[in-house]
Each structure stands twice: as structure tokens, then as C-alpha cells.
Image: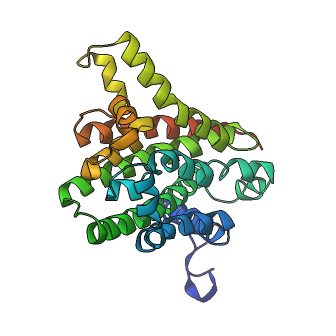
Amino acid sequence: MTSDDAPRGKIYKLPSGTGQVATVMMGQMRLYAKSKLTWIFIFLALLIPILAYGGTAEGILDAFGMPASTSYLLILLPLFLPVIPAMIGGRVISSEFKNRTVYQIFPLPLSRTSFFFGKFLAAFVLSIGIFSLAYGFAIFCGSNLYAPSYPNDALNSFIVTITGVFAFSAMACGLSPYFKRGSAGLIIAIMIFLPMVLSILLEVYVPDKTDLLWNLKVLPPFSGYQALQMIDALVGGFLSSMFDALVGTYDTYKYIVASVLWGALFLGIGLARVKGKEL
């Protein structure tokens, strides 16, 4: 349509790929804002200052003979690191196919690539927001009530967590179109037990910690344990033996590289599925 034919001289054209991704992302974020699950996760983050300033957290730790610290305010991080991205992103694409809403979207002048990455970015950004909230509360409360966390330790811990969130969000969205009910359950089951199984196998069959196979501990399933250990290096008590088996002594950049490669792999797998879906 030329400027002469268009109403009031306006020229209409399709938005750019970036604009399409942003549109899909914002639409999904509005859906997340209406979801009860989103507010449940936010409430869990809000429990950190409530339990810390209410004295409940310290009482629980004392009962197990563990020192109160920032690490223990985030003690469930290894559990929630795979759970939250999986539950947020695990059904974000599969539900579109199940509810057949995607059959109204794909005929529009919107590329499937923009659709896929818009959905992924929405899940990723929301997950980052929830973990950022939890970290902010834990560091603030821990530094004021127990002992200060060193900025460098807290930053490295947060970076490892965020890269883990990227890997798990990509995995959830990448596998989502392959399952009618989404990929959340499968990811949660595998990612919670995989670190423990791998650690046992490594301890038994690869006793030399300098062996190449020990680098498996930079993979995203171990990110939560490593991030927790990094933040103030005070994870101990009855958990000390478990953490000795589950954490490594690797530089932060190795976790970044491993998580980026992991995420890129699953994003490629998911995009191939979405682009290959028949209407």
C-alpha cells in the first residue's frame, strides 16, 4: 500500500523481527501477571525477610546445629533453581498447541521464530525477577542480621544462578512443544536427582578430581549447589558432606559457558520443533 492509497497517508508495514519478539513477550508477561503461580513464587521470595526478621529462620537453623547466614536463607536454591523456570516455561508453548490458540497465531504475519523466542524471553525474564527478589532479600537480611556477604562472593553466586536460570528456562521452553502436558514434570524430576546420581558415579568411578569427567560439575544441574556455596562459603553442619560431593572449585566463567551452551542446545531443539509443526 502506497502513501497515496493508505488512510491519511500512513504507510503500513510489518514490524521487525525484534518488534514481533517484543510483542509476543509482552503478551505472555500479561498472562503471567494474571497467573496464581507467579504470585505464589513471589510470595515464597517474600517469606525470606518474614522468616528472617521474625526469628523463625534462626530457630530452625539452631535446631539443626547450623549457623545462621545468607546461605541458609537461600537453602532451597538448589531445589527451586530447576523448579521455578520449569513450571513457568514448561507449558508456555505446549499449552498454545493444546488449547489450539496457536492455530490462530501462526496464520498471522508473525514468524514462528519470533513466537518461540518471545515466549522464551517472557519465561526467562520472569524467572530472573523472582530469583533477583530472593537474592536481594537474602543478602539484605543476612548482612543485617548475621554476617556481611562479600560483594564479589554474592555477585559470583548470583551470576551462576542467573546462568542456571537461562539454561533451565531454555530447557523448559525447548522441550515444551514435544509434550502435550508440558515439560515441567520431566525437567524437575531429572534435574533434582541428576546431580546426586552423577556425584555418586563420579565419586565411585572417577576418584581423581582432576579428571576431565569432573568438569561435569559445571553443568547447570549443579549450579544451585555451587551458587549457594559461593555466596558466603558457610554451608556446613549436617549438609557439609553432601555439598562436598555436589560442588566443585571451578571459575564462574566455566558455569557461564556451560549454561550458555546448554541453553543454546535446547533452544535449537525447541525452535526446530515449533518450525516443523504442521497446522
Query: Image point 31% across, 65% down: which residue?
Result: 142
Colour option used: rainbow
Residue 244 falls left or right of residue 262 = left
Q: Give the image location of residue 207, x and y in percent.
A: 31, 13
Establish if 30 lies above or below 185. Answer: below
Tell me residue 194's x, y (percent): 51, 29
Please provide percent x and percent y for residue 133: 43, 67
Residue shown at the point (50%, 70%) measured from the top left:
46
Front-most of residues 127 and 194: 194
| Picture mark count | 0
* Residue at image location 48% in from the left, 73% down from the top: 50
Which quadrant is home to the N terminus? bottom right
Tell me residue 125's x, y (percent). 47, 61
Quarter containing the C terminus: top right
**Image quarter of residue 243:** top left
| Front-lying residue, 94 or 137 | 137
Relative to 171, is 85 above or below? below
